[in-house]
Amino acid sequence: MSILSALLLFGFLIFIHELGHFIFAKISGVKVLKFSLGFGPKVIGKKIGETEYLISAVPLGGYVKMLGQEDVGEVQEESDSSERDRSFRYQPALKKASIIFAGPIFNLLTAVVIFFFIFIIGVPTLLPAVGEVMPDTPAAKAMLSKGDRILEIDGKPVRHWAEMTEIIYGSANKPLALKVQRDSGTVTIHITPESKKVKDIFGEEKEIGLIGVKPSGETVKIKENLPNSIKNAFLRTWEISELTIIGIIKLIQRIIPADTIGGPILIFQLAEKQASTGPLNFFTFAAVISINLGVLNLLPIPILDGGHLLFLGIESIRKKPMSERTIMIAQRIGLALIITLMAFAMYNDIFRLISGKPIP
């Protein structure tokens, strides 16, 4: 199940990415020679019109090959103006950038669509109901009890547990007034969250406020209307994109340990784990992977989309294309970096399997 889930996920997201390049190339009038799902030797293929559609042996990738994208010799001499006009190499920089940028954008939009349907269908959300009060904590001292449900904090309505914790986390050593439903009536409880230092998702210490309660586990399915679903889908995609970028920066700064990097085996394991907990978690995981694929492809590393965009930016400043030799050397360096990173990720994956280290 893990391999099937991961392969379906990889295949779908790679198809979406390459479809972005393909559609914008067609819209721009650029001739597409090949559209492949996967790298390496061709398994099956069929030529329809001027494009050969392939499924290749290595499913961890894909590509769209356009006329003149790599080899200038593919384009006939200037006398054949139709070939030259349809060559990627001879397109204006802005048009080439739109074709390259389309792949990552399609991945980000895929995440938006997934989140949109999740919000429309409804997300099971923890209610702000107290399941346990820890001893010798602000909650215990304020006489907060198991079964209490927080309705308001300082006059602000609270719909679910995350809203409640967000307010409390940001209110260390600040008195709060909680309107609480208890049995059939309501009471107001005054409580001051105590300051605690905890580690965030990046392993950095930060100060938050805590009152010492655990949720009851009661949930409600919150469905958003159409406008809110659209807004929240874009917002959630932006938030995860931002976290991905911050994570990359902190990895470079060595704040995040390098052994957290994972490769295909880790993704296979995570796909199996999320698929086993239900379709909602699996599709959320798919959206996150799609965002990561889109963002990582925009890194300014030669051979990735971001590297091609970097070359186009230099081309626009220089007012002429970079030499083929320079591009070739840069792409070889980029390929070496990607292969090294993939090898390191695979090493981490294998080490986790051998050592029995838990999945992040």
Image (cartoon, rainbow, N blue to C red):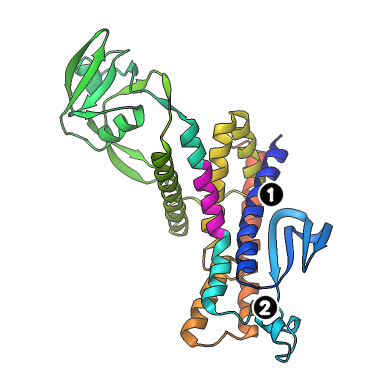
The quadrant of the image that shows the C terminus is: top right
Q: Check disc 1 and give the amino acid type.
A: Gly
Viewer-nearest residue: 177 or 89: 89
* Residue 295: x %, y % from top left: 51, 57
Q: Is residue 358 visible?
A: no
Q: Residues within 10 Å of mark 1 (few under 14, many from 20)?
A: some
Give the quadrant of residue 276.
top right
Q: Residue at x 62, y 41 (%)?
A: 352
| Apparent side of residue 78 relative to residue 98 in the rendered image (left or right) | right
Q: Check disc 2 and give the amino acid type.
A: Arg
Q: Which residues are magenta?
A: 104-114
Q: Is residue 77 visible?
A: yes
* Residue 69: x %, y % from top left: 67, 75
What distance separates the C-alpha of mark 2 from that of mark 1? Answer: 29 Å
Point out which mark residue 218 bears: none
Main secondary-structure element of the magenta-colored stretch: helix
Give the quadrant of residue 29.
bottom right
| C-beta proximity under 8 Å, tags 2 and 1 | no
Q: Does 111 lie within the magenta span?
A: yes
Point out which mark residue 86 bears: 2
Q: Residue at x 53, y 42 (%)?
A: 114
Is 360 above or below relative to 331?
above
Viewer-nearest residue: 58 or 68: 68
* Residue 31: x %, y % from top left: 70, 72
User: SS at mark 2?
Assistant: loop
User: SS at mark 1?
Assistant: helix
Q: How many marks?
A: 2
In terms of sequence position, does the residue under pointer 2 or pointer 1 come before the other? 1
Q: Residue at x 55, y 74 (%)?
A: 95
Is 283 above or below relative to 183?
below
Point out which mark residue 11 bears: 1
Is 236 above or below relative to 22?
above
